[in-house]
Image (cartoon, rainbow, N blue to C red):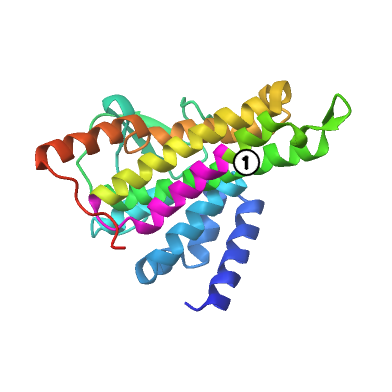
Amino acid sequence: MDAAERDLFAQTLRKTMTAASGRALDTALADLGWSDLLTQAPDVAVPLAFGLLGETGAHAPLLNDVLLHAAGRAVGGTPPLPYTGGAWVVWERTDETGGALDGELPLRTVAAGDPVPLAAGRRALGWWLLGTGRAMLALARSHVLDRTQFGRPLASFQAVRHRLAETLVALDGAEATLVAAEDDLGCLLAKAAAGQAALTAARHCQQVLGGIGFTAEHDLHRHVRRALVLDGLLGSARELTREAGQLVREGRSAPRLVQL
């Protein structure tokens, strides 16, 4: 896929995700050839699709397909997914919402399932968390550019600028780890970095938006809930960081993750 084809695909995905979500989006992406693209060009399909899910706020059970494909199984199913705290959930391919923190997502708690390769799924979730973080940053940036306080634009206050700058640094750092992730440990660390970056974005952007960020009329709360749920899927940032530390202690050395 050359640059022109990639841009066209990105435009099509963005338009589709802006117009649909849930089961309707799942069907639309199937019609666009999602499963074929996942098989033929996963390095293009996964970052684009999951990043745009985060930026648009849409959702679809694409994580199921990524995990099934990595396990050598047919896509279209609903494998049990490990969740933070030792729980397991299933991401249904319906619009029946579950009792999760993010009520828009059709997640259902289940008994422990069979283990599946998690690296590809963690990397995909990392791109989704990155897109969600960038969506929150865009909302906060728009707010501080439009609003004034004490006769000055909010964007002119140093404390506000520092919070947004720290958010951008965290997101850009997470993106670098996602681009470099190749093996199990790399994907584990990338997901942890993306989860931490999204939580950093939620904290700083909520502070910048102030009271309006707590209201249901503003879109920030949807992205905050999404970041919290996605961080818990396939291991939270805290759990994965501890797991990585344990692996390093057991191996008595830190493996090279990037060839510079």
Displayed quadrant of residue 162: top right
Give the residue at x 37% y 36%.
233
Q: In screen coordinates, is 137 left or right of 94? A: right
Residue 181 point in image, percent of width and height = 33, 55
Residue 21 in view, yes or no: no
Q: Which residue is mark 1?
A: 137
Q: Residue furthest front?
A: 158
Q: Amino acid at mark 1?
A: Leu
Which residue range is magenta in the image?
166-184
Q: Position of residue 103 (x, y in %)?
A: 53, 29
Mark 1 crowdedness (10 Å alpha carbons): few <14, some 14-19, many ≥20: many
Please check the rendered image and state whether residue 211 is part of the magenta-colored stretch, yes or no.
Answer: no
Magenta-colored segment: predominant secondary structure = helix
Q: Is residue 244 left or right of residue 41?
A: left
Is 172 part of what is drawn in magenta? Answer: yes
| Secondary structure category for the residue under label 1 | helix
Q: Position of residue 189 (x, y in %)?
A: 32, 44
Residue at the right extreme of this rendering = 151
Identify which residue, 227 or 163, lies in the foreground.
Answer: 163
Asked if 135 appears above or below 241 in the picture, the reply is below
Q: Is residue 116 left or right of residue 21?
A: left
- Name the residue rendered at 50%, 57% in the picture: 49
- Front-most of 134 and 257? 257
Q: Position of residue 32 (x, y in %)?
A: 52, 66
Q: Is residue 214 visible?
A: yes
